Image (cartoon, grey):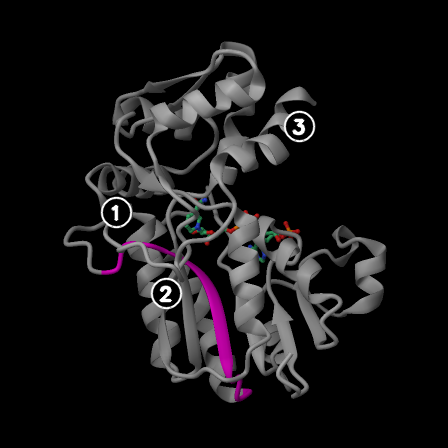
Amino acid sequence: MDGEDNMIVITTPTGTIGQQVLEKLLNSGETIRVIARDPSRLPTRTREQVEVVQGSHSDSAVVDRAFEGADSVFWVVPPDFQTKNFETRYVEFVRPACEAFKNRGVKRVVAVSALGRGWPKPAGLVSASVAMDDLIASTGVGFRALTMPSFMDNFLRQVEPIKNQGMFFSPMSGDRKAPTCATRDIAAVATKLLLDSSWSGSGNVPVLGPEDLSFNEMAQMISEVLGRPVRFQQIPFEAFKARLIESGASESMATGMVDMMVAKNEGLDNMEPRTAESTTPTSFRQWCEEVLKPAVLR
Ligand SMILES: NC(=O)c1ccc[n+]([C@@H]2O[C@H](COP(=O)([O-])OP(=O)(O)OC[C@H]3O[C@@H](n4cnc5c(N)ncnc54)[C@H](OP(=O)(O)O)[C@@H]3O)[C@@H](O)[C@H]2O)c1
């Protein structure tokens, strides 16, 4: 984009954000390398256009190979619902990559992180993400942490109750307005940074979507888009935790999720002042029309 040849490495190329970043970069003219545990999960056409390093990006031999000659890296720590220790999960996952950033002379890293730096209390998974950002920044690599509120795409986990009960659930208050963003906007911001070789140093890039909304307002929009009533139901934190454990989360992961939701309910996602740069285009209504509605009707 800026006239120099860039080699860009993409982690989680089959993940929600990673696959959208990869799709956007395929026609950029840059050399693209992906790290994939199972390359057969990539579309055949994609596999033909990229270099593939097979393995997990938590493995030091894999990242050492993958980062050879790399200018920029798109970095995501995948969620692990079975983790025994959510507090160290992000830092331990990124540690081998941090060594490889230094050893291989990677110039820039763009990572998926979360809003919440400076929150005065432990905030579960958010605090774990912020610790990951600190470790990456400490390597001296050029670094941008994309800092996000909860994703609109999280609603896809509640397609069944929306469809069958006309309800969705959270331990958050239904009236708290907060930003929310679509993963397509995160991918667009990441892609722009990966194609830009002019930046250095480290910093946060908030991705806040176009407006702050409460769950009650979202319920209204979902109802209008689906043409049937859908309401929000607040549930106690203990019930939220029990549901997570029932659906396979470890005790530690469930605790990390609860601590994060407590902080969000107290205003963690409202800490970042909205600016023109942090405001991204996809509205919740548009996302419901284009993503949630087809998933509910399927
Ligand atoms: N959801 C939110 O509201 C929110 C808000 C802020 C930040 N975040 C952050 O967003 C990130 C998740 O992004 P996402 O939704 O794009 O992720 P995702 O879709 O859940 O990513 C799954 C990807 O990770 C890969 N993967 C899973 N386990 C792996 C392992 N052990 N080693 C290597 N690869 C592995 C999967 O590849 P395979 O094909 O090999 O399975 C797949 O590509 C998390 O770091 C989370 O903290 C989320």
Q: Nearer the viewer, mark 1 or mark 2?
A: 1
- Name the amino acid, label 2: Met
The span from disc 3 to disc 2 (Cα, nearest Å) is 35 Å
Indicate the position of residue 77 as horizontal and vertical percent values: 48, 58
Query: Which numbered tag is attached to residue 149?
Result: none
Mark 3 — residue? 294
The span from disc 1 to disc 3 (Cα, nearest Å) is 30 Å
The span from disc 1 to disc 2 (Cα, nearest Å) is 21 Å
Q: Which residues are magenta?
A: 104-117
Query: Which numbered tag is attached to residue 270?
Result: 1
Query: Compared to 283, does 141 lie above or below?
Result: below
Secondary structure of the residue carrying numbered label 1: helix
Q: Residue at x 61, y 26 (%)?
A: 293
Q: Label 2: how many residues lie within 10 Å, few (<14), some (14-19) or many (20+)? A: many
Dot 1 or dot 3: first in sequence order is 1
Is residue 278 or residue 187 the one in the foreground?
278
Residue 106 lies within the magenta run: yes
- Residue 291 appearing in the image: yes
Query: Which numbered tag is attached to residue 132?
Result: 2
Q: Quadrant of the N terminus?
A: bottom right
Secondary structure of the residue carrying numbered label 3: helix
Q: Where, by quadrant of the figure, is residue 291 drawn?
A: top right
- Name the amino acid, label 3: Pro
Dot 3 or dot 2: first in sequence order is 2
As drawn, the residue found furthest toward the front would be 276
- Name the amino acid, label 1: Asn
Query: Compared to 154, does 101 lie above or below?
Result: below
Q: Quadrant of the C terminus?
A: top right
